[in-house]
Image (cartoon, coloured by chain):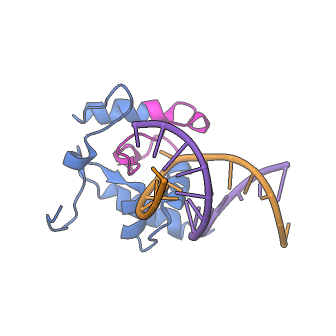
Chain colours: A blue, B orange, C purple
Amino acid sequence: MEHSFDRRVWLAVSRIPRGQLATYGQIADLIGAYGCARQVGWALRRLTLPTDVPWHRVVNAKGRISMSLSREGSDWIQRELLMEEGVPVDAEGRLPLRARLWRQGAMSGN
DNA sequence: CTAGTGACGTGCC
DNA sequence: GGGCACGCCACTA
């Protein structure tokens, strides 16, 4: 049983500060799996709630919550959790990604 | 083995 | 903004 990938994803996600956001691609890049954003989604999907992992702080590059029927409502839970943290969520699921993007030491160069 | 699908991303029209 | 194509990898039929 090798949760190596999953665990790396969860650890990276756990480092996201409260009230900030990160994208799937960003997490993938952090764990050295550039281009494997989709696998990050799979890793989060394997999470069992409740969890210590702030999975709700991970959104897609479009700055929106990834809505899907297969999530059975977890996408709406994500919306609730984000608003609880002070992150405004648009009626269309859009988020202020540009302003709330997590930067772990990255320099501000746009 | 192949084909399709998915909590994704980038590029191009 | 929307739509299409391709690449990525795990899972399922």
Tell me the quarter of the image containing the N terminus of chain A. bottom right
Magenta stretch contains residue A53? yes
- Give the extent of the magenta segment: A47-76
Identify the image quadrant of residue A103: bottom left
Location of residue A74 with respect to A39 vertically, above or below: above
- Visible in this render: residue A11? no
Left or right? Give the position of A30 relative to A33: left
Q: Is residue A18 one of those drawn in magenta?
A: no
Picture coordinates of residue A104 (x, y %)? 22, 64
Whole-percent x, y for residue A81 in the image: 34, 34
Residue under the image location 47 percent in, 64 percent down: A7
Q: Is residue A70 above or below residue A99?
A: above
As rendered, which of C9 and A16 lies closer to the eye? C9
Can the viewer see residue A73 in this picture? yes
Q: Residue at x 21, y 34 (%)?
A: A86
Residue A58 position within the rendered picture, expressed as x and y whole percent measured from the top left: 38, 49
Judged left or right of residue A71, residue A65 is left
| Res A91 → quadrant | top left
Residue at 43% of width from left, 45% of height from top? A51
Asked if residue A96 lies left or right of residue C2, the reply is left
Q: Nearer the viewer, residue A104 or A52?
A: A104
| Callout count | 0
Q: Is residue A30 depicted above or below A60 in this figure?
A: below
Q: Observer-nearest residue: A51 or B5?
A: B5
Task: Name the residue furthest left.
Answer: A108
Q: Specify the principal SS of the magenta part.
A: loop
Quadrant location of the C terminus of chain A?
bottom left
